[in-house]
Image: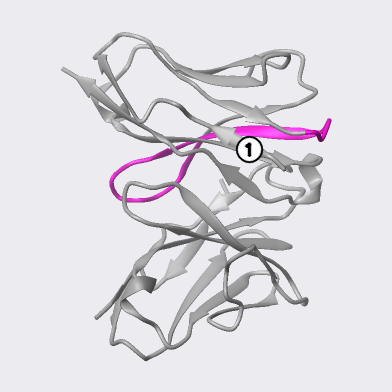
């Protein structure tokens, strides 16, 4: 099956600093990548949709200047949390789809990144 | 706007028995897809099963089957012969549009399943 990786798997940063999370599709070209956020015992909330080579589309209520998303290639998308605060502490998950193979309908999820802001 | 509802925050099932996790949805798009994912405590999202809105038959994948009732807008997950390893959070999700349009997934609130030995 298709594999999506995320790096780092966990990160601790100080309040006010920025942190970058990478999402890579390892064995397929991802035309679209999605970034989700999940608080403990809650559902996944979509933050933004990114298509290779174009600006990300953010969901309502998500600050695009705080959560910078770049989808520079067909295998890599990055999420940068700028000026992080303790309330940004969460589990961030990316997913990727090619719209064709391996399966047109399926999104492939990364293992997630746990961010803790102190 | 599309909406997904899971009304069971938590469920218990005895090992080797079957269990049904409920999911209802709402959309005005005639083309959509319905998904079930399993999320163990490690956090990874494990794809279980998919049902397209035009699929005539209910989807099955091993011990998982999706009870798709289009008129009722429900897509319940049935797990047969529960195993201890099935204990996890289960999410129902929906994507509007055709399969190859790469549409976003909207998730339900989740159901935490606990399998008792």
Number of marks in the image?
1
Front residue of B27 and A22: B27
The N terminus of chain A: image quadrant: top right
Task: Identify whether A22 is placed above or below B8.
Answer: below
- Residue at 35% over, 51% down: B43
- Residue at 39% over, 25% down: B8
Front residue of B96 and B102: B96
Q: Is residue A33 magenta?
A: no
* Rendering coords of residue B69 (x, y %): 66, 13
Residue farthest to the left, as pictured: B117
* Rendering coords of residue A110 (x, y %): 48, 58
* Rendering coords of residue B36 (x, y %): 53, 33
* Rendering coords of residue B40 (x, y %): 33, 41
- Secondary structure beneath dot 1 equals strand
Residues in magenta?
A: B28-47
- Residue at 72% over, 47% down: A101
Task: Identify whether B53 is placed above or below A111.
Answer: above
Horizontally, is A4 left or right of A16 in the view? Answer: right
Mark 1 belongs to which subunit? B
Q: Is residue B39 magenta?
A: yes
- Asked whether residue A95 is in view, the answer is yes
The residue labelled by disc 1 is B3
Horizontally, is A46 left or right of B28 in the view? Answer: left
- For residue B28, what is the image quadrant? top right
Disc 1 residue crowd, few under 14, some 14–19, many 20+, Cα 10 Å:
few
Horizontally, is B46 left or right of B49 in the view? Answer: left
- Residue at 77% over, 14% down: B56
- Asked whether residue A29 is in view, the answer is no
Task: Identify whether B92 is placed above or below A71.
Answer: above
Front residue of B19 and B108: B108
């Amino acid at each position: 099956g298709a594999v999506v990786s995320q790096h780092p798997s966990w990160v601790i940063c100080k309040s006010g600093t920025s942190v970058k999370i990478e999402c890579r599709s390892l064995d397929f070209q991802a035309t679209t990548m999605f970034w989700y956020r999940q608080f403990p015992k809650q559902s996944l909330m979509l933050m933004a949709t990114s298509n290779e080579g174009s600006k990300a589309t953010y969901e309502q209520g998500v600050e695009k200047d705080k959560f910078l998303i770049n989808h520079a290639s067909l295998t890599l998308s990055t999420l940068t949390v700028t000026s992080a605060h303790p309330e940004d502490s969460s589990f961030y998950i990316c997913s990727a789809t090619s719209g064709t193979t391996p399966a047109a309908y399926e999104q492939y999820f990364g293992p997630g990144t746990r961010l803790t802001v102190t | 706007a599309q909406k997904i509802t899971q009304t069971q925050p938590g469920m218990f099932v005895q090992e080797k028995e079957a269990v049904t996790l409920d999911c209802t949805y709402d959309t005005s798009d005639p083309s959509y897809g319905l998904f079930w994912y399993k999320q163990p405590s490690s956090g990874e999202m494990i794809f279980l099963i998919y049902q397209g809105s035009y699929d005539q038959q209910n989807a099955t994948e091993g011990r998982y089957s999706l009870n798709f009732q289009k008129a009722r807008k429900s897509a319940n997950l049935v797990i047969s012969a529960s195993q201890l390893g099935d204990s996890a959070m289960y999410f129902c999700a929906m994507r509007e549009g055709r399969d190859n349009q790469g549409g976003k997934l909207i998730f339900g609130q989740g159901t935490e399943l606990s399998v008792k030995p």
